[in-house]
Every structure is written in structure tokens, then in C-alpha cells.
Image (tube, rainbow, N blue to C red):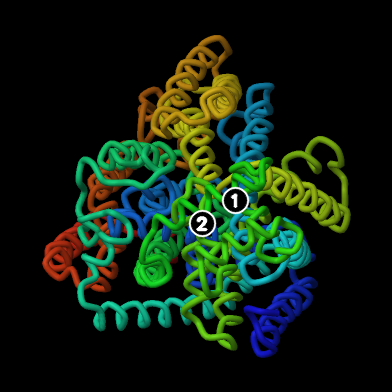
Amino acid sequence: MKYLNLIDFMVIGLYLAILVGLSIFLKKKASKSLEDYFLGANKVPWWAMGISGMSSFIDMAGTMLIVSFLYMLGPRGLYIEFRGGAVLILSFMLLWSGKWHYRSKCMTGAEWMEYRFGSDWGGQFARIFSLVAVILTTIGMLAYIIKALGIFTSMFFPYSPETCALFMIAIATIYTMISGFYGVVYTDLFQSVILFTMIILISAMAYSKIGGSENLSAIAEKVTGNDEWTRSFLSWKVKMPKGYEAYQDLTLFAFFYLLRNFFFGISSAGADPRYFGARNERECGTLSFLWASLMMFRWPMMIGFAVLGIFLVNGLFPDQTIITQVAVLIKAHIHNVTRENWTESLTNIMNFPSNYPAELINGLKGMLKDDWQSKLHLVSFDGTINTERIVPAVILFNIPIGVRGFFFIAFIAAALSSFNSNVNTTTAYFTKDIYQRYFRSKANNRELILASYFFTVALVSSGYILAYNLHSINQIWGWLIMGLGGGLAIPAMLKFYWWRYNGGGFAIGTTVGIIMAVLCAKYFPHAPEWQEFSAACFVSLIATIIGTYLTKPADDAVVENFYKSTRPFGFWKPYKKRLAPDVRKAMEKEHKNELIAVPFTLGWQVSLFLLPMQFMIRSYGEFYINLGVFVFCLTGMYWFWYRNLPPKTKII
């Protein structure tokens, strides 16, 4: 094929063979019990789960999307990704929500609902609605992953994005089903080696390119129109290209995205199987610290892709008005082209030019000159650079054939790491909380694992269908995080912090929140994300409070057991009085240290991600200021968090 040679295909084939081989090797171990299949029987080392967490968060879709914002804004693109890509929820998982979930001794977040609300109708309702919310979120997340997978792979193969994504997802579904949580962790470890190799190579290429250029800032301004591309610190307004104008109020968006992280972080963020699979509370903290620290390496790679993308676009399109003319020409000759089918239309034009009018093809050749088909990848529906395709374009134009296969599998690895983690977690919910509990309580281990296989196929199929009814990665991510996330944030949060809160309040608040998120997406599809988030949060908060007081409180013994075993902070006065004085004093000290540590931990994480980007683009003045912030925040973390972690052998 045009963009890959025999060596590339051999590398890709070897990668896929290792994945399938690993899954077959781990099948016997994973199928011993549900605990083995979904949690690794609590035998997986904390460092392996930390690396696995990092690998699952370095996804293809997120990388392509974040690179698009870094391409437009420089390091300040990080602030837009406060909505999710900067994974600030790790700060809260590190401090408390991870260990609170560990203390529950539950296998899934839905099982956790019954532990919190009891087994009456409210608890059952909460358990079911928690599952519904997780399934909906996972379908959206899979659509996000699949959409990016199709966009990426179709730039290397002469097939539509739908066909390319279907092939890769089929393989990933098979190995995820067979190997369970062991497969999630150990394939993530294997794929982490590939990812780190790519990170080093791209970072080195970009750093060398900047060193040999006359002026990165001037070239970035010419290509993106942003005269402050190398700046790192927040500014109230920024210049954004057509289609991204909603993000020009950068500080406002960063604030709302940070608020969203706060709500999500203090609520459900710790409901990850890695915490349920930890061996003690200390491991919950240390695996989170390793997880967040390793995420730092993602950012020099992404700013590296953005830098290489700027130089690439500057070379390919010295006059960017050509891009607008190309888009106008295509729309004039293909009357049924829409934003939703734009990518597929471009793929068909590139691969089957004889199917289109000669006037269109000759016009494209005349405008784009040499290698017109490859350049066409970068044209967006709006007549601008399609920034979501910067990553595959850099690989296509900057990486020599014969080496592209390695970069190809590195991004496939990133996509599949996120894919298998999401699928494994959600399948555990279904098998444990629906199938076993309500349909086949006496089902044997083999039947339960078979049920998980069937559900996995249904889940992935739903995500695939959704992916190709939406026009961009950003559209999916924005609604998923700010729309649906806003509808679920308040009901999920209150379960930790308010003693009167019950299953009825959770069920009603969650239902109303989901409905509000769907209505916003349907009737106000172009509303700013912060407005979607605010509306969904406000409506679900009112519904949650009303639902709580319309239904009877949860059983007193259940609530007391939850409070004594989990020990959260918040409005727990009736139950706090029942604790022994020494226990209460120790718990208050723990809570005080954790809350004081929040700004230090968030500051540490943000400065950690900025530092390598500032160094990469040689913004040394801001680098040294940020280094001081990093050291200060790390010291605060040590004093208020790390030195207070319990030893491994301590049983709480």
C-alpha cells in the first residue's frame, strides 16, 4: 500500500500477534473466578496497576484532540483540557476517593451503592441507575475512542474510517473478553513500552526541529494566527480558528472545567477496579502518585506533535487560503456532503478519484499540487486545517516509510489500552450487578464469564453505532464530560458527604440529570460546554434534594456501617457522635490534612504537565517560575499527604 511497506506490516502483524498471544496465555488465570476475571484476585502489584492506569489514560482519541488544542494555543491548550484530558481527578483519587472505595471492599461501583444505601427499593434503584449511568458513559467513551481510531487508521489504509475502526475494535474485543483484568494490566504494561519509545522519539524530533528553526513563535503565529503561542500562563481571551470560537474565553472555561473536576473528583473518581484490586490503603495512594507522575510524559510528546504539525502545515500550505478554496470546491461538486460525512467523503475522493467529476479532481490537483491526496487529509469542513488530523499527518509526512509501522502501533496501543480498561470495568458492573443478582444468582463461574462475553459484544457494538452518528472527536468528548458529566456529578458526589441522602434521591437526581444532558444535546447542540454543565448540575441538584426528602431515609444500621468503614468527611454529625473520641480525633486529623493538600496536589499536577512543554519549546523564563511552583507544591504534598500514609501492614 502507498503509506506502509512490508516492514511496517510485519511490525503491525507482530504487535497484533503478541496481543492475541497474551490473551490466550492469561485466559486460564482470568477464568478461575469473577475476582480473577475482573480484579486480578488482588494479586497484581501496585506499580503494575499504576503503569496500567497511565497507559489506559494515554488514549489515541485524547492525544489527537489535545494535540489539536496545543497546535492552536501552544502550552495553554492544557487549560482547555482541564475538562478531562489533564486528568485532574487523579489528585482526588490520590488523596481520598481511591482509598474510600478500597475500604468498601466492593467489586464494582454499583455494588458500592447497596453498601451505601442498603438493599431496600432505594438501594436497588441506586444500584441499577448507577449501572445505567456507567453503561451510557462507557458507550459514549467507546464512541470517542472508535471515532478517533477510524480517523487515524483511514489515513494509512485505502478504506473508510468505519471499516478501519471495525477491524481494530474486533481484535481488541476478542482479547479483552478472553483475558479480563489480567489482560488489561499486562497488555497495558506491554503497550507502555511502545508508548514510551514513541514519546522519546517524537520529543527528540520536535526539540531538534525547534533548535534548527529561525523562530518558532513567528512560524506558529503565521500558521495558527496566535501571536502568543509560546505563552504558558492563563489569559482571559485567546484567538481561536473557525469552529472553535467557543473556547476563546480561556480563563472562564478553565474555571468551569476545574469546577467539573472538583465535583467529579470528590465523587465517583475512585471507582476504578485498580483500587478495588489494591492490597492496602497505602497502595491506593502510591499507585495514584505513580499514575499521575507517569502522565507527565504524555505532554512533551503532544507538544512535540503540535510543533511538528506547525512546521508541516507551514511547509505544505504557505498560503492557507488554498484550504478554504479546496473546501468550497468539494462542496460545490458533492452536494450531499455534510459535516458528519466529511471525513468519509475525503477518503473516497482520495482512494477512488475516478468516481468523481474530472473538474473536481483536476481542481484539487491544481490547488494542492504534488501529493494532493495526502494533503487533502488536513482540510476541514470549515475550510481550515483539520487540527484533529495533525497527529496522523505528522506520522504520514515526517516519519519515513518502514518506521511508520511502529508509530502506527504506538497509537493503536494507546487506543486499545483505553478501550480494554473501559470495557472490562463496565462488563464487571453488568455481570455482577445485573446478570448474577437479578437473573442467575446460582450461575456457575463459566456461565458468568460467558454472560460477560455477550455483554462486551453488545457494549462495543453500541459504541460503534454512536461513533458514526457524530461528526468529530471534540463533539463527543465535550458532551460526554461537560453535558452527561454535569448531569451525573451531583448525585454521585452527595453519597459521600450527606448522611440524609438516600437511594431514592440518587435515582431521581441521576435520572433527571441524564434526561437534562440528552435534551441539551438535542435542542441546544451548539451551546457552550460550560452552560451545558451548569444547567445539568443545577437541575440534577434540585431533583436530588427533592427526591431525598420525598423518600424515607436509608436504614440507620446501613448508613452507620458505611460511615464507620469508609470514614468520609462532610455532613455526618449524627453518626460522628457515635465514634469513640480517639477514633474521631484521628479521622478529623486525616480529613484536615487531605483538604489542605488539595491545592498543593492540583498545583503539583498542573505544573508537572507544564514543565516539559515549556522546556521543549525553550520558554525558559516561564519554565523556571513554574519549577518554583512545582517544588513548593510537591513539598506541601509530602507534608500533608505522603508522610501521613499508613504503613503497608497497618489494618484500619
Above or below residue 21? Residue 110 is above
Q: Residue at x 80, y 72 (%)?
A: 28
Q: In the visual, does 280 lie left or right of 639?
A: right
- Disc 1 residue type (three-letter): Ile
- Determine contact: label 2, label 1, CB under 8 Å: yes
Label 2 CA crowd tier, 10 Å (few <14, some 14–19, many 20+)? many
Q: In the visual, does 319 lie left or right of 615?
A: right
Q: In the visual, does 578 lie left or right of 560?
A: left
Q: Residue at x 59, y 26 (%)?
A: 522
Instruction: Kindly state the secondary structure of the residue where label 2 is placed.
Output: loop
Quarter of the image where one finds residue 568 = top left
Instruction: Kindly state the secondary structure of the residue where label 1 is placed.
Output: helix
Label 1 CA crowd tier, 10 Å (few <14, some 14–19, many 20+)? many
Pinpoint residue 417: horizontal percent, then vertical percent.
60, 65
Residue denoted by label 1: 330
Quarter of the image where one finds residue 648 = bottom left
Residue denoted by label 2: 379
Q: Considering only order in the chain, which callout, 1 or 2, is on the residue closer to the N terminus?
A: 1
**Which of the numbered marks, if any, corresponds to residue 365?**
none
Quick one: which residue is furthest to the front in this view?
359
Q: Residue at x 64, y 72 (%)?
A: 156
Pinpoint residue 249: horizontal percent, then vertical percent.
28, 38
Q: Which of the two residues, 493 or 33, is positioned nearer the viewer here?
A: 493
- Disc 2 residue type (three-letter): Val
Q: Would residue 414 be visible to someone looking at this image? A: yes
